[in-house]
Image: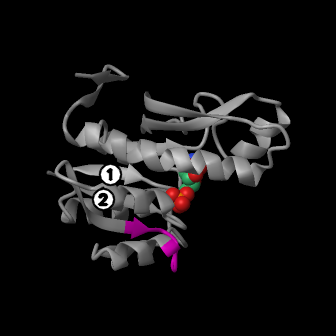
């Protein structure tokens, strides 16, 4: 059973799906938020998971990341899951957790990295969008893809309706990938996600 820490910045609905799906493969042992009052913290507390606030305010990126790293090591985390964590992590931090750090992004990467994803997908007239779980590398939203789930973009779609439907597939996808990683069935090898 792998010890998993989850980093959040907000609502924490993906965190909720990871908590609900936790079984024999992983246990969420700590939730860390960089935002005070993030709703995801309440979700974690309601599930009996210990929480921690580490604010990024008034400190350098390196100092913030060092605090997060120390908290994760102190909690004995073996896997770190980013779930709506809206901070860019420094290269040193990312290298320290290589192969053990995953993120979910609400697009079919490598398309639509960054923010305002659903607005841009609709503006571009895409027929398909979706969600991607990937290993985190220093470059933003550029890590090796582990799994994706697609969602058709419907006529008269608004960014909100598309976000809602993508979120629904995120909630199914993320626990499945975390289980694979915790069971050692997917690994980062030579810059690629390799399955066994
Ligand atoms: C999710 O849609 C996630 O994919 C996205 O933020 C949302 C968080 O929702 N993440 C990113 O855009 C990361 N670049 P949640 O707090 O309810 O899980």
Rendered image: mark on residue 5: 2
Rendered image: mark on residue 80: 1
Q: Secondary structure at mark 2?
A: strand
| Image x and y of residue 157, in percent | 80, 44
Residue 153: image quadrant is: top right
Dominant SS type (magenta): loop
Rendered image: mark on residue 70: none
Asked whether the residues under the numbered discs 1 and 2 touch, taking CB atoms below 8 Å apart as contact, a structural biologist would say: yes
Q: Which corner quadrant holds the C terminus?
A: top left
How far separated are the C-alphas under marks 1 and 2? 5 Å
**Within-10-Å neighbours for mark 1: few <14, some 14–19, many 20+:** many
Is-magenta flag for residue 38?
yes
Q: Is residue 81 above or below residue 134?
A: below
Q: Is residue 186 above or below residue 69?
A: above
Point 60% across, 36% down: residue: 130
60 displayed left or right of 69: right
Point 76% across, 49% down: residue: 159
Range shown magenta: 32-39
- The residue at the far front in this view is 155
Q: Secondary structure at mark 1?
A: strand
Point 42% across, 39% down: residue: 136
Q: Is the CB of mark 1 within 8 Å of ligand 1?
A: no
């Amino acid at each position: 059973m792998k010890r998993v820490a989850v980093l959040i910045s907000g609502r924490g609905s993906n965190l909720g799906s990871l908590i609900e799906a936790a079984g024999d493969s992983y246990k969420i042992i700590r939730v860390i938020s960089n935002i005070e009052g993030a709703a995801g913290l309440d979700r974690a507390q309601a599930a009996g998971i210990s929480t921690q606030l580490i604010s990024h305010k008034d400190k350098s990126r390196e100092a913030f990341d060092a605090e997060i790293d120390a908290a994760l090591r102190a909690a004995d985390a073996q896997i770190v899951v980013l779930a709506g964590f809206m901070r860019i992590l420094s290269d040193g931090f990312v290298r320290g957790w290589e192969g053990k750090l995953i993120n979910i992004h609400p697009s079919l990467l490598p398309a639509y990295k960054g923010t305002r994803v659903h607005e841009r997908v609709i503006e571009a007239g895409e027929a398909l969008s979706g969600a991607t779980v990937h290993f985190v590398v220093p470059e933003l939203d550029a890590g090796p893809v582990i799994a994706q789930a697609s969602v058709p973009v419907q006529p008269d779609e608004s960014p909100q309706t598309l976000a809602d439907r993508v979120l629904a597939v995120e909630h199914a996808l993320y626990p499945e990938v975390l289980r694979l990683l915790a069971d050692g069935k997917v690994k980062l090898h030579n810059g690629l996600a390799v399955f066994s």
